[in-house]
Each structure stands twice: as structure tokens, then as C-alpha cells.
Image (cartoon, helix red, strand yellow):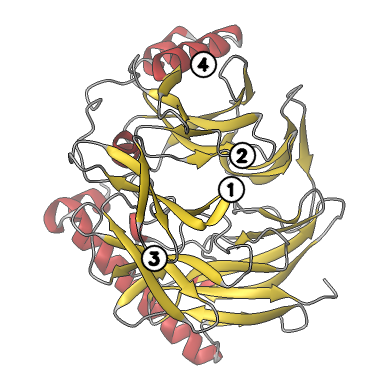
Amino acid sequence: MKIKPILKKVFGERTLSTAKGEALHYICSVDRKINRTTTYQYDKRHLVLCKTLTWKKYHVFRGYYDIDYFNSKKSRFLCHRLLLNAESGNNKCEVGYYDLRTDRFVKIDETYAWCWQQGARLRWHPMDDSKIIYNVLNSNGDGYAARISDAATGKYIGEIPYALYDIAPDFSYGISLNFDRLQRLRPGYGYSCLTDRTERESHPEDDGVFRVDLQSGERTLLYSLQRLADLNRTELSLGGLPEVEEELFDEKIHYINHISISPDAEHFIFFHIMTKNDPKNWETCLYVSDSEGKELRMLENRDRVSHYTWIDSSRIMVTLRKTDGTEYYAQYDIYDGRKQTIDIRGLDRDGHPSALKPGQDYITDTYPQKGGFQYLRFFRLSGSNSRRVARFYHDYRLRGEKRCDLHPSVENTGTFFSIDTTCIGGRRSVMIFSRKKSE
């Protein structure tokens, strides 16, 4: 008889998870004292620690790794700030920026539309970095919107009537999804303000991937979850899907995550995810579409896709997991679907890759390893080895959707990068590094 389900029933899943986190944190703390290991360490031959953005009463964090949080002058750095005991859906999250010359946090606004892994999708306006864009609960309280505010004055400028996941570099369109459904099926990535209206449907016809015209505010459903489910079923049937598996396929619940628009705004990728309402077990299909939703190509539906970055406007880099648990990196040509495994030593663990120099140099991270440490690695796409350049202790007391991945994100020149970390006092903080010129 398995004891874990019994303990969950007696003590409750949250209580059990909290106790496990406390125990792991204690064990790691003892281990660090015995081995005289600090909570973070970086290679000073290659990196310079420029700033640590932290606040004793608050979590300070950026959001996901696929956004550049620096303004063009590198003088302001976008951040979220959140009370230490805050819970998603019940507490507002502050959005604003740090003035990197004075280390002062400038609050612009507050929002209920935030999550632990991706914040409010806070970003600079791609055409004018005197403005910021972030998702909010709309004024009626029955949906979400993307708000635009002036970064200098905090003055409200306008709203797009739908929350946005990603925005085209030319600000012509954005891509959106059902953030309530996403949070229900993948806690930590969507919003907890509202009830998911599609909760009773496994693959609704009126929900899926939406395109939003950023001039008119008009929203168009490009790919419904029903259509994507049918496409996936057809693909598996062509591969010889047994009848019993087809019955199991009908039980799966479908949703969308991880949308990313190409650097030239001509295409976007997204993950179509299937689960049995278990956040720890899911299957994925990686798709690429043209910006108008007229052409759709399935790039991967065998191995489970996890994270992504654009190499250039025609290629993407992705991390994957095989059914035997093996993890690896690969690249895809979005036009012909050609896949190429990236055979570089050290890239055998899932991570969040970002380009330091597109097409050449990259940075990635790991999930917590022995002793609770997460690692940063540099690698060159044309090379054969990666290089470990830093490690940071992950506080296990932040668990589940509150966990803190490093999520290294890079500014547009490739000189600076930043991470979220809990290595300072067990609360979320941001560390900003620069690469030395020899890199």
C-alpha cells in the first residue's frame, strides 16, 4: 500500500507539501554548512554581478524568460513586486520598474491578472519604450485586458480588450488564449481571478489560439481546441493508434500554452497540451503557424516539448523529454519541419534557453539538482561543450506554482542577462549580470 495518498488524505496535500519543503530546505541548509557552500556562486572570470534587486517585505520578480526587461537605455528594468504572503487571485501584484541608477522601485500600477511563473506578461511597448504593457482584470471584472501606461508618469494611456500572451515586434497583432483555463490545468501560468467558463469541456469549439488586432482590438479565433484535437487524433491514427488508445484519447483535456511570435512577426509557435487533469502528466504538440492563421504545421508530437527560443526567424530551439525520461535539446526549421538534435555536452537536462547572440551563443539553466542548486550554462550552437558559469540555491519552501526557476532572460545586445532566484532570504529576488568582453 502506498503511504503518500494516505498522508495526503489525513493531512491535506498543501500541508504535506509544506512539510516536505521545510524538510528539504533544512537538509540542504545542513549540507551547505557542512560543506561551507554559499547560497550562490558565479564564475568571476566570465561574469560581473551588476545589480541585486530585492526587498525584505516583498517578492521581486520579472516574469518569464522570453521577454527583455531592459529599456533601450538600460536605465530601467521592469519588475513585479508582491507581498510575501500573497496568493494569486486574492492579491494585487505591483507592476513597475527599477531605476538602475538609483536602485529605486517605481510603481506604475497594480493588477490581479498575474501568475507566479509569468507575472502579468509585463513588457515594454515594442515601438516606444516610454510605455509599458501588462495584463489586468478589466473594469467590468468579467474578463481580462492588456493595459498600456506611461512609464514616466504612470498615467493610463489605453487598453486592448483582451489579455495578451505575446506581441508582434511591429505592434501589429498579439496572440491570446484562455488564461483561466490555463491556470486551472497548469497552475502558475494563467490567472486565478475568474472561473473557467470552459471547465466542463475537454476541447471546446470556441476556445483555443486567438489573434488580436492591436489597432482595432478585434479578436479572431485562429485554431480551436476542437480542431487541434481532431488534427492530433488524425496524426495518431495515421501512425496506427490502437482502438483502446483512441478511447483513452477521448478522455484527454486540451489547452494552449507557450505562444511565441517570431522575430520578423511572420510566424508564431504554440504548444497544444493534452492531460487527464493532472498538472504533472501531459503530452504536447508543437505547432508553427503563419501570422494570419492560414498555414499550420505540426513540428513535434512524439517527444514532450518543454521550452523554446527563436534561433532566427526560420528556426527554433526546443527542449524535449522522451518517454524513457531522457531530456535533450533540438532545433527545427519552421518551413520544412526538419528536426536536428543539438548534440552538446551538458545539455542533457531540461532548461530555459535564450540567445546571447542569436544563431551563435546561448544561455540556459537547470531545475534544482543535488543540494537544491540550479545552474546556468553557456553554450555555442556550433560547439560540442557547454560551460557551467553559476549556481544558485533554490529554496524548497516555495513549491508547486510558487516555485522559482532561474528563467535567464537576455537584453537585446546580449551583454546583460537577469535571473529570478530565491537564494536571498528565501524570497524572490532578481540578479542582473553582465558578460565580460572576452565572452
Query: In the image, 274: left or right of 323?
Result: left
Tell me the CA gap for discs 1 and 4. 37 Å
Query: In the image, 143: left or right of 305?
Result: left
Query: How would you rate the neighbour count of disc 1 (Cα within 10 Å): few for under 14, some for 14-19, many for 20 or more?
Result: few
Amino acid found under the numbered disc labelled 1: Met
Whether label 2 touches label 1, CB < 8 Å: yes
Question: Earlier along the polypeptide chain: callout 1 or callout 4?
Answer: 1
Q: Secondary structure at mark 2?
A: loop
Which residue is under mark 1?
Answer: 127
Locate residue 217: give its quadrant: top left
Depth check, front residue: 425 or 385: 425
Tell me the CA gap for discs 4 and 3. 48 Å
Amino acid found under the numbered disc labelled 2: Asp
Question: Earlier along the polypeptide chain: callout 2 or callout 1?
Answer: 1
Whether label 4 touches label 3, CB < 8 Å: no
Residue 232 badge: 4
Residue at the spot 39% in from the left edge and 65% down from the top edge: 153
Query: In the image, 29: left or right of 197?
Result: right
Tell me the CA gap for discs 4 and 2. 32 Å
Which residue is under mark 2?
Answer: 170
Query: Nearer the viewer's eye, disc 1 or disc 4?
Result: 1
Amino acid found under the numbered disc labelled 3: Thr
Query: Nearer the viewer's eye, disc 2 or disc 3?
Result: 3
Which residue is under mark 3?
Answer: 153
Query: Nearer the viewer's eye, disc 4 or disc 2?
Result: 2
Question: Earlier along the polypeptide chain: callout 4 or callout 2?
Answer: 2
Amino acid found under the numbered disc labelled 4: Asn
Q: In the rendered image of this protein, does residue 416 appear above or below residue 212?
A: below
Query: Nearer the viewer's eye, disc 4 or disc 3?
Result: 3
Where is residue 125 shown, x and y percent of the image?
52, 50
Q: Residue furthest left?
A: 10
The mark tally for this picture is: 4
